[in-house]
Image: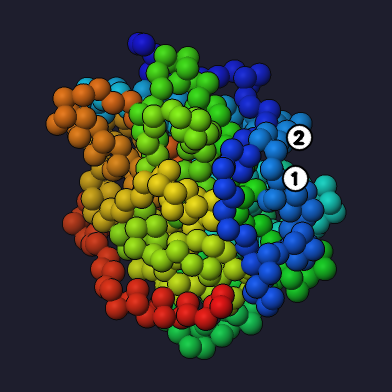
Amino acid sequence: MDRTKIILNESEMPRRWYNIMADLKTPPMPVLHPGTLDPIGPEDLVPIFPMALIEQEVAQDRFIDIPNEIVEAYRLWRPTPLIRAKRLERALETPARIYFKHEGVSPTGSHKPNTAVAQAFYNAKEGVKRLTTETGAGQWGSALSFACSLFDLDCMVYMVKVSYEQKPYRKIMMQTWDADVVASPSMHTNSGREVLKNQPKTSGSLGIAISEAVEDAVASDNAKYSLGSVLNHVLLHQTVIGLEAKDQMETAGDYPDVVIGCVGGGSNFSGIAFPYIRDKLAGRNLRAVAVEPTACPTLTRGVFAYDFGDTAKLTPLLPMFTLGHSFVPPAIHAGGLRYHGGSPLLCDLVRKRLVEARAYDQTDVFDAALVFTRTEGILPAPESAHAIRAAIDEATDAKNQGEERVILFCLSGHGHFDLSAYHAYLQGQLEDAEFPDEALHRALEKLKGVSN
């Protein structure tokens, strides 16, 4: 096929989300109440989430209808283009065919609005007035700020301190949508003050920021908490990516041999991969590759255990690969991937060997980002560049093996707010963060006794 961009009409946009729970032969282990160690019920989540999202969290239906109000908002940027990376293919001299789903065309520059819009809608419909959340690199905070502006909700964002300092324009972007943004840990919450008391110079972490956002929401009568990754309903909303990609790949007359996405909590990877993993579960020959940083190697070096999703232990216990809820990752520029755990659904698929996991150093990732930028012309977010690194390696392997290979990856966002990272790379100042075994062992020691 000679086309570079495959673009669907708005009328061809998916009208239902795909729920992979319906196709799993054995379900993931249940989420547990930290006090009783019993599986949590809907009533346990009511202080945090609206009932519509709680129902989606436990839904078993294969497809769930997308309300018209959400479809209307999606039309601001969806469907997103599927692009054949022909110039990258030529530069690599590979027989592989490389495609990427470009989620950076959304108003906030990433895939995150796919769930932010849905969560804001359901909260507003149930009378919630304010949402609280955390954000790492700022992509999720930007998305929820945007979504709250669409549905007339107040928004409070706890932004991980290192990203707050590295990416000031993300903060300004959130404020233009009328959100309040503070660096986490902050003096706004008990959990934030406790961290600052013990670690006054900490760079922060998503685990700490989650604690602050959950505490804030629970303490308010008219607020709920909103999470940008990890949970089932978030991954559900993101499947619009893969559902569109399947229609576009069919138009292109191709089908991927390998589907790739970067992973922090798991939302964009699951969004593009879950609709294809449905085919894999039905017998289709397909590989799915989840890519993470070596500085925060949750899937590749973490242990599978019940752990808290946050540092202050305010969340339920999640069955997942984890580096320990007290783990504070090095201050790499891929802030959206600095999370100690992962989605229980995704971790379950990794355990069942339905998904492969691999990790890359920061400099290797930026090497790949420059190759991509200088061929395809798009500056990728550091998070997305992890998927690019894996796609280039797959294409190079195809060349070495002398075989055709169809590669599909999710370009989860652009890197226009990450120019300080690119500047450091171009100046030769970007370094790989060490992850010593001792740090992992210390964090995992605190897991003992968490769920038994």
Q: How far from the left and from the top, in percent, is residue 319?
A: 54, 62
Nearer the observer: mark 1 or 2; the answer is 2
* Residue closest to the far top: 2
Crowding at label 2, few (<14), some or many (≥20) Cα neighbours within 10 Å?
few
Residue 73 visible from this viewpoint: no
| Residue at screen point 54% across, 51% down | 345
Dot 1: within a 10 Å radius of its alpha carbon, few (fewer than 14), some, or many (20 or more) residues? many
Q: Position of residue 368 (x, y in %)?
A: 26, 42
For residue 69, above or below residue 121: above
Q: Mark 1 is on which residue type?
A: Phe
Specify the label residue 121 is tagged with.
Answer: 1
Q: Do the residues labelled 1 and 2 touch (CB within 8 Å)?
A: yes
Task: Work out which quarter of the rendered image holds the N terminus and state it.
Answer: top left
Q: Which amino acid does label 2 sit on?
A: Pro
| Residue named by callout 2 | 67
Say which of 172 and 13 sits in front: 13
Can residue 47 be seen here?
yes
Residue 191 lies left or right of residue 252; in this view the side is right
Provide residue 28's location: percent of width, then percent of height.
Answer: 57, 53
Which circle marks residue 292 in the picture? none
Q: Residue at x 36, y 46 (%)?
A: 356
Considering every residue shown, the one lying at the far front of the view is: 25
Q: Residue farthest to the right? A: 127
